Amino acid sequence: MSERKAQTRYPFTMPVGWFAVAESPDLAVGQTKAAYYFDTHLALWRDEEGVAHTSDAFCPHLGAHFGHGGHVDGCQLVCPFHGWKFDAEGNNSDIPYSERTNGRAKVKAYPTQERNGFIYAWYHPHDELPDWEVEEVADITNGEFSGPKHTNHIVQVAIQEMAENAVDSAHFRYVHNTAEVPVIEKYESVGHRATMESSQKFPTPRGVVNGRIDSIADGPGVSIVRFSGIIDTLLVSASTPIDANTTETRFNFYVRSMGDDKLNSSVGDAFAAEVDKQFKEDMPIWEHKAHLVRPALIDNDGPFMKFRKWYAQFYVDEVSDDRTVFPPPFWPEKLDETPAKATASAKYGTADGETPVEVAPPAPI
Ligand code: FES
Ligand SMILES: [Fe+2]
């Protein structure tokens, strides 16, 4: 029998970066919570001063999971099993039935910061510290935009494969049935930041409106997309590797306030529903596609190789594999799965039967 080489799904593992591990409102002061990202069991906790923390899940004493029954005492995490306490750096700070602490009992703490409605943890496979911070989006806090409307999805795809969708201008017509496709005017990267500027014609009942879609990606996990032209909308998108082959994406949608809560919420709902619809149209493509190391691109395709070059900086460990085609596993239960027939994406959304509100964003993800 020939020996079969163990194969990975992709020629890359999990990238380095800041990644959302929770939405801010989902972790109350004093709460602990279980999570699973970076192929690791994690515990999230918010201390009594309101600061969010991310740590490995298992207590170094006898392995209890802090996120299942653990609690918070001031700024310490307390294990549910024998009451040992740990500080924000993961050092053992108290053992209730001993006069001494245990200097060898250390819990790995992940750099954690809270911005823009998300709790972000820093992932690096060799625990190196962050070399950038997640930036605050002023529009969210200055009252000019209303929201967020939140959605999330878990997809059987590597985070890079999903992100590549943003530079794939041609697929909008064929997967999402949009009448017009965005024209990518500029794609640039400096360090961890990649910016893309694109224009798009939006068909509306009053004629064609010229719109813009401009995005900033700060590493693989943080992305801000702004749509303008009809109604200004803002999407804070956060993708996080659950493992090397599985990604959770969270969207927070905001709309420039129009002074009327009902209208804001109607437009926000329409915006979220459209991006969500397009995301679901993309999902089966992503899950069933092979990753091609050398795709047969033409000049009119988007800047795929620029994107891949920028993204490559976030991988620390090489995957040694000389294949150029990386197919998905065989999933018998998904054999008949095909993408949903895309419906038109031209205009949608009404405020209780009033004039339709056109927001028309193509999926930015
Ligand atoms: S397992 Fe955590 S205190 Fe014993
Ligand atoms: Fe898409």
Image (tube, rainbow, N blue to C red):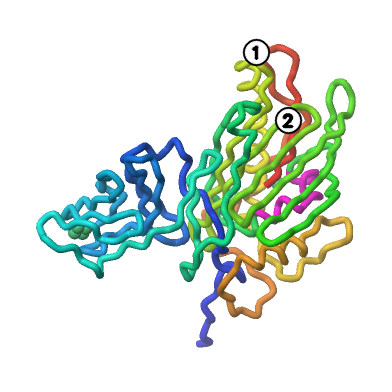
State the residue in front, 319 or 178: 319
Q: Residue at x 56, y 63 (%)?
A: 16
Give the residues in magenta: 163-175
Residue wearing tag 1: 352
In this rendering, is residue 222 above or below 340? below
Residue 145 in view in this figure = yes
Where residue 71 appears, as percent x and y from the top left, is 26, 45
Within the image, what quadrant is residue 226 found in?
Answer: top right
Label 2 amino acid?
A: Asp
Label 1 amino acid?
A: Asp
Q: Residue at x 45, y 61 (%)?
A: 39
Q: Secondary structure at mark 1?
A: loop
Q: Earlier in the sequence, mark 2 or mark 1?
A: 2
Q: Is residue 335 left or right of residue 126?
A: right
Residue wearing tag 2: 232
* Ligand 2 contact, mark 1 (Cβ < 8 Å): no
